[in-house]
Image (cartoon, coloured by chain):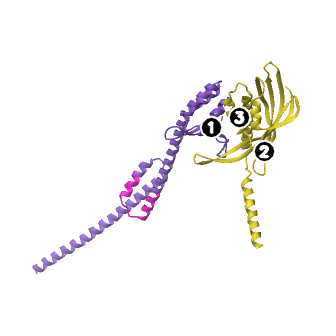
Amino acid sequence: MNSLLKSFALLACLTALACDIHAQPVNITPERKRAIDSLALEKVRDLSKYISIIGDKATPLTESNRVIDRTLELFMDGAQMGVSSLNRKGVRYYPVRKYLERLRALNYQKVNIEWYNIQYISDLVQQPDGRFVGVITIYQRFEGTMEDGMRYVDVTKKDITVYVERKQQQIGGRLIGFWDVLLGDIKVTETRRG
Amino acid sequence: MQRFCWILFIGLVALGGVTSCKSKKKIAEQQAAEAKARRISQAKSELQALLNDESRSIEEREQALARIKGQNIDDPEVQALIRQVEQKLAAEKARRAEEERRKAEEERRKAEVAKAMTIQDYFRDIVGSGNTEIANRRIQEALQLFASPDTPVLIVIGTFNGEKDYDRPTTISKYLNYLKDQKKAPHRIINVKRNAAGKIEELELEKQ
């Protein structure tokens, strides 16, 4: 019984230590926080450009494949993208790769996607596990033109959950500390005619 | 009687001679002691001056010290001062060497960044190519400057309390394609590391 208690105490200690290793809130100055905020916004702007390249019918397949891979690097594993349409109710969610592949295969002769008003609606806030989590909202104007000239245009408002985590990587024999920005689910909160 | 007088005379002369020799030796010893004291005093004041001297070069002060050491003055205070001066000069030499090393490193870094201007030119070309094919060609050319397409690229997002904060490290191949995709060159080169073959093996950029 005594040894069982000892084992339990040891396990509890090890668990507490393990939690402590992961939960390492970093003390940061407002200036440093601004740099992180700006970095996360930049990643969303990068995503906006990638989406427009993938959607563009003029983009060669090899290029769009490469850009899809780069786009996936911006997201957390398992992240989903919400898709809405003026022609149906509700929002469908797809894993990001599937969403990008569907976007590339859209049945339009020309697709133009533009993101604007990219801003935080919920500031990055540090969580007990040390990660920063916030929400960035964007407006997307989608314009698809059919061969016969018919146009479909909508504007959707999307909320992107953003995670920023402090990580380290060995480079050239030294340990580099960096902020890893990863995008989570993208939710559609509003869809209207453009 | 006359004989006795002669013996007395010779004795007196001999006695006088011995006394005179003894006093000459004493004088010589005294003179030597005085000279030594003067040398010690002179050495001490010169060594003190060396300890406080900031105007002469290290080499000049080393020569002055060597002169004093060459006198082989057997005096504990002089020896202690010599050690102090030696320590001071050694510390100054180490500081100077460190400063020279830092200067050389800074010069090397500046030269590397100046050379890297060609890379910055490639960055601009890729961004402004306006055509995927041309951009890809420029990317291939630019990659020739690097040790491999996987050469690490570090992007500083800010420096806080002397500590650099980075974006997620990337590779040169990905970075050049990033420039092509995003059609913007938002970073400037701040550090370039090359391998023995002169190829870039690490690139450090900063948000501009």
Q: Residue furthest top?
A: A148
Q: Nearer the viewer, residue B78 or A105?
A: A105
Amino acid under label 2? Val
Q: Which residue is mark 1?
A: B205
Please tell me the numbered disc located at residue A133: 2
Quadrant in which residue A99 is drawn: top right
Instruction: Identify which residue is drawn at 15% across, 75% down.
Output: B10
Label 3: element kind: helix
Quadrant in which residue B8 is drawn: bottom left
Q: What is chain B's hue in the picture?
A: purple
**Percent of width and height locating residue B69:** 38, 57
Q: Residues within 10 Å of mark 3 (few under 14, many from 20)?
A: many
Q: Residues within 10 Å of mark 1 (few under 14, many from 20)?
A: some
Q: Which residue is mark 3?
A: A68
Label 1: element kind: strand
Region rendered in magenta: B63-84
**Percent of width and height locating residue A36:** 72, 41
Q: Is residue B80 above or below residue B114?
A: below
Nearer mark to the viewer, of 2 and 1: 2
Instruction: Identify which residue is drawn at 59% across, 27% down.
Output: B137
> Is residue B185 visible to us here?
no
Quadrant in which residue B201 is drawn: top right
Amino acid under label 3? Ile
Q: Report in which chain the residue with disc 1 lies.
A: B
Q: Report in which chain the residue with disc 2 lies.
A: A
Nearer mark to the viewer, of 1 and 3: 3
Chain identifier, yellow in the render: A
The prevailing secondary structure element of the residues shown in magenta is helix
Instruction: Identify which residue is drawn at 64% across, 34% down.
Output: B187
Which image quadrant: the C terminus of chain B?
A: top right
